[in-house]
Image (spheres, helix red, strand yellow):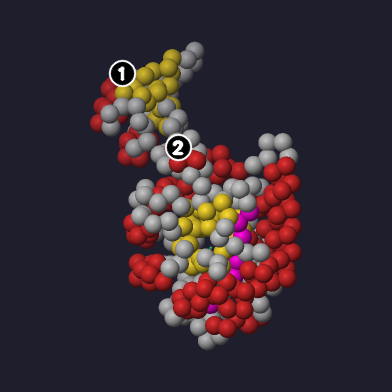
Amino acid sequence: MILPKGTRLTPEQVAEVTAIVGEFGCSIQPIIGAVRTIYAIVGDERDELMINRLEGLPYVDRIDRIQSPFKLMDRRSDLSSHRIRIGGVTLGEDLLVIAGQCTIDPKNPGYYLETAAAVKEAGAHVLRGGVWKPRTNPYAFQGDAKSIETLMEASRRTGLPVNTEVMDEQQLELALGAGVQMIQVGARNALNYSLLRAIGRAVAKGDTIVLLKRSLHMGTLNEFISAAEYIVSFGNPNVILCPRGTAPALDGYRNHPDESITPLLKEKTWAPVVVDPSHSVGKASFVPACALAAVTYGADGLCIEAHVSPSHGIGDDPKQALTPSVLADTITQAKQIWALRRSVAGGV
Ligand code: PEP
Ligand code: MN
């Protein structure tokens, strides 16, 4: 829908607009109001280039889209009945818990194996473990490829699937080759379209799941869903949206907690939402409250950093990781909220 700056377009402007939309197989239908005339775009109005060209016209105030920009991720798309299953959980039917260390310490792999057993005991369905780490400071520890063996050993011992972040194609190949079931796209890479493309292509034929974090730089929710759409467009619909706090940080927290966007995401897309409270608030003592708030807001799952001995951890673990007993309590309470939420009328 084209909304002009003035009360209506001049005949020359109508001709210009008609020519532009015509290039994209669309036409214009004026809707004449008492005060203002607006112009419906008849046809498939999803082409970004067409919208950009119309928005660039000096006499156009704005374009309101009637159609969803997402062909695949829209909640009315054919994919909306798709269900993602991992770790014995069908997303949307039971609360999914992903838990484990931020980072596997290659010098102390034993901690990871202990943590893996403990988070399983606490009720986690998927193990998380950072093999390669995106860091704010380039001199900080960036990970070690040999930790992939520790990750897979933990998977074998616990019988749980694993999640790890990849930042380039080489890491992606190593992770998929090792049998990682869930590939994480971190907040710093969620808008890195060449990585999203590489992941989309690599997982196109299989049933690997992609956990897509929300980038600090994703202004709109559409940008977040579009990134998911891009991965899914290669053929594998197993993409989970993961809000993890955004910038600017709320004074005292690591980021600005954004678990409240879940209902807004769900209004637009069928994609499951798994919230990461650890990076959102950034401090272990605040994580349980954020996790429970996330479930209250409709999250389908949680991704929580945990460590058997946080003070011996590396990466974010000394600050953010829950001990297994706090994790167990948080999961118990989260499940109670999940059940309560589902029991109220219209609960989702
Ligand atoms: C992480 O999961 O450890 C991590 C680095 O997350 P994010 O990309 O959300 O910062
Ligand atoms: Mn972390």
Q: Is residue 87 left or right of residue 194?
A: right
Residue bearing mark 1:
11
Q: Position of residue 271 (x, y in %)?
A: 51, 47
Q: In the image, is residue 98 above or below residue 56?
A: below
Which amino acid type corresponds to the residue marked 1 in the rendered image? Answer: Pro
Q: In the image, is residue 102 above or below residue 57?
A: below
Asked if the magenta segment contains residue 236, the reply would be no
Q: In the image, is residue 159 above or below residue 146?
A: above
Residue at (47, 47) in percent of width and height:
225
Q: Residue 205's quadrant in the figure? A: bottom left
Q: Can residue 177 be seen in this snapshot?
A: yes
Q: Position of residue 263 (x, y in %)?
A: 61, 43
Front residue (pair 159, 241): 159
Which amino acid type corresponds to the residue marked 2 in the rendered image? Answer: Ser
Residue at (48, 44) in percent of width and height:
82
Front residue (pair 29, 343): 343
Q: Position of residue 145 (x, y in %)?
A: 42, 78
Mark-to-mark CA distance, 1 and 2:
37 Å
Q: Can residue 316 be seen in this snapshot?
A: no
Q: In the image, is residue 115 above or below residue 285?
A: below
Q: Are marks 1 and 2 in contact (CB under 8 Å)?
A: no
Residue range in magenta is: 95-104
- If you read the primary sequence from the N terminus, does the residue marked by circle 1 or circle 2 appear first? 1
Residue bearing mark 2:
77
Q: Residues within 10 Å of mark 1 (few under 14, many from 20)?
A: few
> Which of the image's four quarters has the N terminus?
top left
Residue at (51, 51) in percent of width and height:
84
